[in-house]
Image (spheres, rainbow, N blue to C red):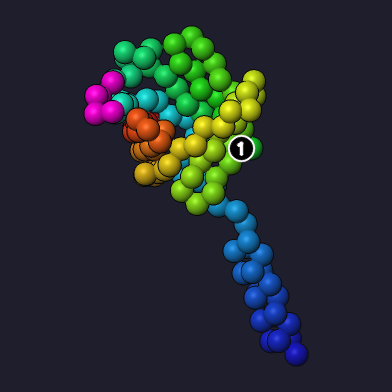
């Protein structure tokens, strides 16, 4: 009987542990490395060395050339949706790569730009 209880308890523990939501790899603070805008490379220093902060609580803060944008983010597979606080216009980002040191995404439908961020 003790073995059955132990097996059930172990199974329940594994089930609950597997239900925990994993923190997305893009969560953290990032710096712009470069941006590819319709084939033209633009480097961070030209744009004032922007920073991007994605928090665990699904909020974000961008600092670009003295301007600050705050909002909330949501993730659906490889699509990151940003909703700024002061606007209902959502920004859709297609994640290309996200790991501990690199975050790359594409923005836009007509003129696609690729953004390269680093830790």
Name which quarter of the figure residue 70 lies in.
top right
Which is nearer the eye, 108 or 32? 108
SS of the residue at dot 1?
Answer: loop
* Quarter residue 116 falls in: top left
Name, please, the residue furthest toward the front: 110
Q: Is residue 42 left or right of residue 50?
A: left
Residue 83 image position (x, y, % from top left): 59, 31
Q: Image quadrant for the N terminus? A: bottom right
Magenta span of residues: 38-42
Residue 42 against residue 22 in the figure, above or below? above
What residue do we see at 56% from left, 32% from top?
90
What residue is disc 1 on?
A: 58
Question: Can you say whether 70 is above or below 26 in the image?
Answer: above
Residue 41 part of the magenta segment: yes
Q: Is residue 52 left or right of residue 20?
A: left
Quarter of the figure that contains the C terminus: top left
Name the main secondary structure of what is drawn in magenta: strand
Q: Would residue 78 be visible to someone looking at this image?
A: yes
Residue visible at 40% across and 36% down in the picture: 109
């Amino acid at each position: 009987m003790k073995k059955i209880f132990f097996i059930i308890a172990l199974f329940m523990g594994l089930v609950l542990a597997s239900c925990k939501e994993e923190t997305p790899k893009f969560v953290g603070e990032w710096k712009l490395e470069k941006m590819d805008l319709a084939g033209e490379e633009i480097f961070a220093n030209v744009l004032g060395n922007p920073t991007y902060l994605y928090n665990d609580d699904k909020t974000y803060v961008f600092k670009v050339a003295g301007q600050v944008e705050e909002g909330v983010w949501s993730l659906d597979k490889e699509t990151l949706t940003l909703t700024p606080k002061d606007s209902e216009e959502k920004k859709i980002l297609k994640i290309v790569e996200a790991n501990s040191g690199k975050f790359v995404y594409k923005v836009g439908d007509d003129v696609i730009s690729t953004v390269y961020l680093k830790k």
